[in-house]
Amino acid sequence: MKIGNKLLGLALIASLGAAFSSAAVAGGVTTADLVNDAKTTGDVTTYGMGYGQQRFSKLTQINRATVKNLVPKWSLSLDSNQPQSQQPLLVDGVLYLPTVNATLAVDAITGKQLWKTPLELPEDVYNAVCCGNHNRGLAVHDGLLFRTVIDATIIALDMKTGKQVWKTLVEDYKQGYSMTAAPVIANGTLLAGISGGEYGIRGFIDGYDPKTGVRLWRKFTTAAPGEPGGDTWPAETYKRGGGSTWITGSYDPELDLVYWGTGNGGPWNSAFRGGTSMDNKYIASVLALRPKTGELVWHYQFSPNDAYDYDGVNENVLADIKVEGKSRKVMMHADRNGFFYVIDRTNGQLISANKFVSRVDWAKGIDLKTGRPILSEMSEKHHKTLVMEKADDVWPSALGGKNWMPMAYNPETNTAFANTLNFGMAYRTVEQEWKRGTFYIGMDFTGFAYDSKQPRGYLKAIDPLTGKDKWAVPLAIPHFAGVMATKGGLVFTGSMLGDFIAYDDQTGKKLWSFQTGSGMVSMPITWEKDGKQYVTVTSGTGGVYALYSGDERLKNTPTGSSIWTFALSN
Ligand SMILES: [Ca+2]
Ligand SMILES: [Ca+2]
């Protein structure tokens, strides 16, 4: 029975593969296709809907007036109970997407699966994964698809057939390493980040030859003695110092710089890493790297000596904006630590850093001259105390004022749209030794601190330079899905209860929603073919809030994954 199905499946894949390859011989995806992705509405070739990760589309057919006629065109099962937090790509009428244990191609108009390539994964591979088994997306170039695999490998697949072309072992997953982020092709190099910041890894960003999978360079994100920043770590602590790189960097092709965020220190307990006297370069930072060589051109550290698992991995959105009347090339970053940063991306100079959430306990502000946070008294104490007697409430929590789910940015109105979080945590440091494959955080994590009178999150329209919201939609259950904005005046995102929602980008009014059958933690895209606009998104619950929030209201939202495509009814 099982063998019969498998043979039938192979035959089917072979025949569909043949039909598809003749229909889409072009299928290349050139460097120009990647550079121009944000402008071209007929394809989605990059994570972020453009190298700058604005997640903004100029399409207007689906707009404030017409969105009420938005209906599903098709849905396809992803045959998985894992969380779906990926963003699909769209090339020549075919959607490509990863799940944690397979890669697939789907006809974008009919919803028919064209091929699916399963991954052979060891059974114990999920042991050292903190927050659900994810894969967030693909890169594509010159006929090949690239993806990371949770067992800390990278593979390349033939776009037409799904056949594996090469596979590279990056690290040993048994040591706490895993890979979940979409890789990115920048200036002909394949860049990839590593996960495992909760397991005492030493983080890095790697560059590979996309043709062969051979590693060209590795930039470690914790500095060893003798290297620049090596004196910001006590003794050997950099070796298990964290600095994972689990969200894809953005890229400016003109400046030829990749902007990649780095995660929390290992362990979370910062007294272990020298307290306030040690910054721990380059954790909780953004690194501006040359993609060809991995050379560090500049860096900015959001949370020196990060004590609260604030990470610094959140997306870095690139735009040219007016600052005091002058156009500046900036990157924007809404950090877990509660501040919205605008940084000159040519040189790393801090332009502004303002709170985008109501309560930030760790810092009173960011000194624009030095770029350093002004720590609160409580935070000064936390940084230095190896073992705390009793817990303090700290806002934002370890999940941050905003977690990984990317914001969108409308360059025409200079507005960012972000799903933000509004709760704290009970924080108490404890001593901890590293043990392979187990949590290495040095914290007695007893839970989150919710305020029953306040919503746990908001969808916010944020002015980047002030951090102030133009509007805020209170969310009793916070959203953990990415946001997409369109010139049609819409902001799309998904809820933990499975509603795919379109909001008015001027007011935050909910204009449309559709129940997708499971909770949503993914990233939507929009595209057009033959004059018709489509919106595609995956559904499938899981992730950090589902795992750790204890939110009883999620109990009737089942797992089970699918991909949906919507368009206006005729
Ligand atoms: Ca495009
Ligand atoms: Ca972390």
Image (cartoon, grey):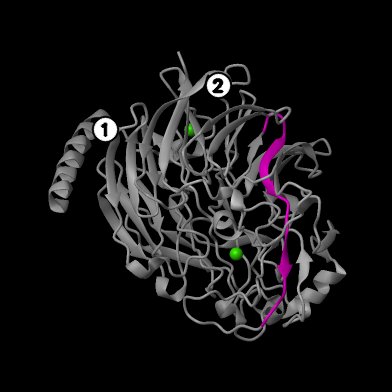
In the image shown, does 379 or 410 lie closer to the viewer? 379
Question: Which is more foreground, mark 1 or mark 2?
Answer: 2
In the image shown, does 191 or 535 lie closer to the viewer? 535
**Residue placed farthest to the top in the image?**
570
**300 w.r.t. 45: above or below:** below
> How many residues crowd mark 2 within 10 Å: few (<14), some (14–19), many (20+)?
many
Q: In the image, which residues are magenta?
A: 411-430
> How many residues crowd mark 1 within 10 Å: few (<14), some (14–19), many (20+)?
few
Which residue shows up at 30% across the image and 49% down it? 157
Percent across and percent down for residue 415 are: 71, 35
Q: Mark number for residue 25?
A: 1
**Dot 1 beta carbon under 8 Å from ligand 1:** no
**Would you say 325 lies left or right of 511 here?**
right
Query: Which element is circle 1 on?
Result: loop
**460 w.r.t. 335: above or below:** above
Q: Name the residue under label 2.
A: 62
The amino acid marked with disc number 1 is Val
- Give the alpha-carbon distance from disc 1 to disc 2, as whole Å: 30 Å
Query: Which element is circle 2 on?
Result: loop
Q: Quadrant of the C terminus?
A: top left
**Would you say 313 lies left or right of 183 here?**
right
In the image shown, does 562 or 553 lie closer to the viewer? 553
Percent across and percent down for residue 136 are: 47, 50
